[in-house]
Amino acid sequence: MSASISTSVLSHGELSKRIPASETAVFQHSPEADSKLRREWEPGCQPDEIYDRYLPRWRAWLRRYLVKRLREEKDWMADWQVRVRTEGRDKFFYWTAIFGTHTFFMTFLPVLFFFGFPVKARGLLYVVGMGIHISSFAKDLVCTPRPYSPPVIRLSMSTHHHEYGFPSSHSTNSVSIALFFGGWLYELRHQVGSSANAPLIITVVLFVYAASVVGGRLYTGMHSTADIIGGSLMGAACWLLWVIVGAQTEAWVNTGTWLVPAISIPLTLGMVHYHPEPLDDCPCFEDAIAVLAVILGSFVGHWWGVISGEAIPSVVQRQSYQSGPLQGITVIAFRLILGLGIMFAWRLIAKTTLLRILPPIFRTFSKVSGEDLPTRRFYKAATDYKQVPQKLAFRQIPSVVDLQIGTNENSSFSTSPVDSPVLSMNGHPSKSSSAFLQAPSTNGVRQRTREEEEKDKEEEEKKRKDEEIRFLIRVNKRKGDRSKYDAEGG
């Protein structure tokens, strides 16, 4: 229990002998001491010139500042990890990281709805949802790598950690959740009484929860100090914002005005449209879309419940499990099983249905209007494919408008930092990658307008910038920032 893990004290040279040098980060996917190390691709590891050329100047400046901090931290983080890692701590932080995953939020966030606390349930959903969206937005905005590995070793439960480093979304979510429940506990202080031990115990539990998740991101090598500080501040800001505007927002929706859907729907679509485009393939955009859809659904559902009436009043929901211990336990178990079962079943049904009906609708809209469908890098418009590939049909988080053409966690192909996701295996644009950079063809002949000409100029400028990036990648022989460490440390 107290002995340091053998994998955490390996030198950089020993790691190089044990692991192929084709990827960028060293992962340990089990807390066991004899677990196998493996290298995996991560975004944010292209040479700095690539990001300077692709990103706007102010975004490139932010990235350079954060990357400079990573270089300054790399040695002490590796030394600190060697000193503090033990098998017992590895298991603890390995498992507490689950409290920041999509699966946890999918099962945890609806629970308050099940037990008759809709106001608090919506508040928790909006606080956590804002944190997920803001952290995803920031990741794609600055495109920073995670801490340098090697020398740091990643301890992670899943292989699906192909997101940028800054900020730590785990830190954002855990801090916002702890503050939310802490604030709720403060509201109940007069009902509980100052002599009871429950408030103190709950406060300690919330503190340990937040500290374990935030500190665990540093311990496991998944984030730097700047990542967890930035993520924690974002989580606190989301909670504070809801403290300020939460009551007014609830009161506004409770008026039943049609302004609720008239404002919330266009606002959500605008937030999706103006999400920053990163250089590397990153799932942050899908995370942002998913949580915005959940928040919008809650807003519209709450509004519809106001104008049509609740099926079961909240007070009845709470009283139904307060009649006695045995009945209470039975009702709680039944609601959890039924509620989560319905939620997962609805997800499968909705996803299957939408994958069948939305692409034809988008194609028809493009054909009738003569407009090209909006697409993002690494995604494919509905006009450019006929059928959804089976391997993408049941991905964890589906796209709303576009079909992602990158590989998923079950794919055998993994992209190298030199072979950017923009390129094919031989370093040249593949047919599929160049297809989504071109406007899809439409039937009929239509008169060209000034807007179309300006759009074509923007497309040409985008292609020119992509070609410059490809050229820089081909002529640059080093493996991004990790090679800088290799050159320095030997």
Image: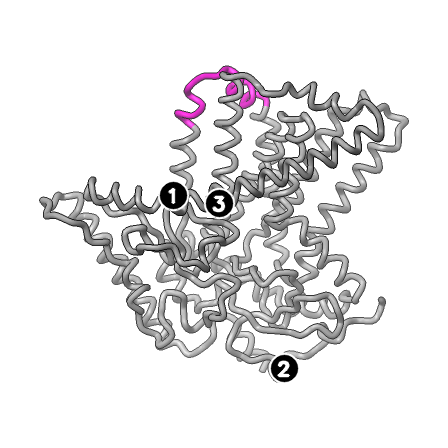
Residue stretch in magenta: 247-263
Picture quadrant where residue 361 is located? top left
Q: Secondary structure at mark 1?
A: loop
Residue 468 in the figure: left or right of residue 64 = left
Asked whether disc 3 touches disc 2, contact meaning CB atoms under 8 Å apart, the reply is: no
Q: CA distance from mark 1 to mark 2?
A: 43 Å
Asked whether disc 3 touches disc 1, contact meaning CB atoms under 8 Å apart, the reply is: no
Task: Report the residue marked by disc 3.
Answer: 288
Of callouts 3 and 2, which one flags the residue occurring earlier in the amino acid sequence? 2
Confirm whether residue 182 shows in the render. yes
* x and y percentages locating residue 417 in the rendered image: 46, 71
Q: Secondary structure at mark 2?
A: helix
Of callouts 3 and 1, which one flags the residue occurring earlier in the amino acid sequence? 1
Task: Report the residue marked by disc 1.
Answer: 274
Magenta residues, dominant SS class: helix
Confirm whether residue 67 shows in the render. no
Residue at left 76%, top 24%? 188
Q: CA distance from mark 3 to mark 1?
A: 11 Å
Task: Report the residue marked by disc 2.
Answer: 18
In the rendered image, the vertical position of residue 49 relative to residue 460, given as above or below: below
| Residue kind at label 2, given as amino acid type | Arg
- The residue lying toward the viewer, choosing from 362 and 452, is 362
| Label 2 neighbour load within 10 Å: few <14, some 14-19, many 20+ | few
Q: Secondary structure at mark 3?
A: helix
Of callouts 1 and 2, which one flags the residue occurring earlier in the amino acid sequence? 2
Q: Is residue 369 magenta?
A: no
* x and y percentages locating residue 24 in the rendered image: 53, 71
Eye-nearest disc, 1 or 2: 2
In the rendered image, the vertical position of residue 101 relative to residue 19, given as above or below: above
| Residue kind at label 3, given as amino acid type | Ala
